[in-house]
Image (cartoon, grey):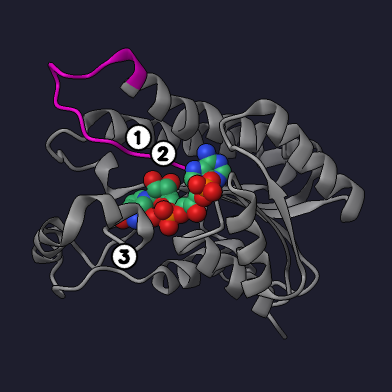
Amino acid sequence: MRKLEGKVAVITAATSGMALATAKLFVKEGAYVFITGRRPGKLDEAVRVIGNNVTGVQGDAANLGDLDRLYETVRREKAKVDVLFASAGRGEFAKIGEVTEKHFDDIFDLNVRGTLFTVQKALPLFSNGGSMIMNGSISTIKGFPSFGVYGASKAAVRSFARTWLMDLKDRKIRVNVLSPGTIDTPVLDPVGPEAKEYFKTLIPRGEMGRPEEIATVALFLASSDSSFVNGVELFVDGGSAQI
Ligand SMILES: NC(=O)c1ccc[n+]([C@@H]2O[C@H](COP(=O)([O-])OP(=O)(O)OC[C@H]3O[C@@H](n4cnc5c(N)ncnc54)[C@H](OP(=O)(O)O)[C@@H]3O)[C@@H](O)[C@H]2O)c1
């Protein structure tokens, strides 16, 4: 029996990286997935790569109108959500003293406000007993230089999980945070090869995580294998934040 047979999953920002790997694995495990991304060409490509049991809905996870359109599509096509992986997030560096309003607003707008409304707008369709997963970061508990606003935004997401599991306990909806360490995805492209080599030195195994190593953990949190796991922040970082 596949682990997500008959389940409907929504995964935001799933045209690349760990969320795309998760979408592929969820489909392999029997789910129908709705994925989002802003660039239509990239979204079409992801839908093609996933191959079947997938609908792509173009949109920005920070835009409430786009989120309404996403869930209207889900309602029309499948009429329920069993699993949500709210993965959309962004990060930029700015040292305290150099933080601009735009830097703060851009990051909190997507990571905090966008995540909140991605979850809230899913609720009318959400199945009792379903699973919500939010993409966090080890920066919730680390002091990475110049990454304060990003870290604070992901710490807010971590906090949401504690409250929301209580708000949703009568519906038996579980809410967990999956907090990756450094994962080799296109989000790291702008930092360049030298910075990537440096990141590797911070990881005990000396290699970054692969998107597929996040997907298997997302599957665990999505499926009944984690039925007694609720409100945790699960670090998937090769141990780098634990030492
Ligand atoms: N990679 C890491 O090392 C790492 C570590 C910890 C946490 N994270 C978190 O993991 C999540 C995704 O990371 P990733 O590295 O897997 O991403 P990625 O490979 O860079 O891909 C993200 C995809 O999401 C889409 N996207 C970006 N912003 C979006 C938005 N506002 N609305 C909808 N789609 C959007 C992008 O396509 P479009 O540009 O076409 O929209 C892109 O193809 C983020 O929450 C990030 O903070 C990453």
| First in residue order: circle 2 vs circle 3 | 2
What residue did someone put label 1 on?
155
What residue did someone put label 3 on?
184
Label 1 vs label 3: CA separation? 22 Å
Question: Magenta stretch?
Answer: 89-102
Question: Magenta stretch: residue 96 in it?
Answer: yes
Residue 239, given in percent of the width and then of the height, sits at 21, 64
Between marks 2 and 3 in the image, the one whose residue lies nearer the viewer:
3
Q: Is residue 171 left or right of residue 111?
A: right
Does the rendering let one see residue 3?
no
Q: Is residue 5 left or right of residue 101?
A: right
The residue at 76%/33% (across/down) is: 68
> Circles 2 and 1: CB distance less than 8 Å?
yes
**The one of 193 and 81 positioned closer to us in this rendering:** 193
Between marks 1 and 3 in the image, the one whose residue lies nearer the viewer:
3
- Which residue appears farthest toward the right when viewing the image? 76
Q: Regarding mark 1 in the picture, which secondary structure is present there?
A: helix
Does the rendering let one see residue 89?
yes
Give the amino acid at mark 1. Answer: Ala
Q: Residues within 10 Å of mark 2 (few under 14, many from 20)?
A: many
Q: Residues within 10 Å of mark 1 (few under 14, many from 20)?
A: some
Q: Quadrant of residue 89?
A: top left
Quarter placement of the C terminus: bottom left
Label for residue 158?
Answer: 2
Q: Main secondary structure of the magenta part?
A: loop
| First in residue order: circle 1 vs circle 3 | 1
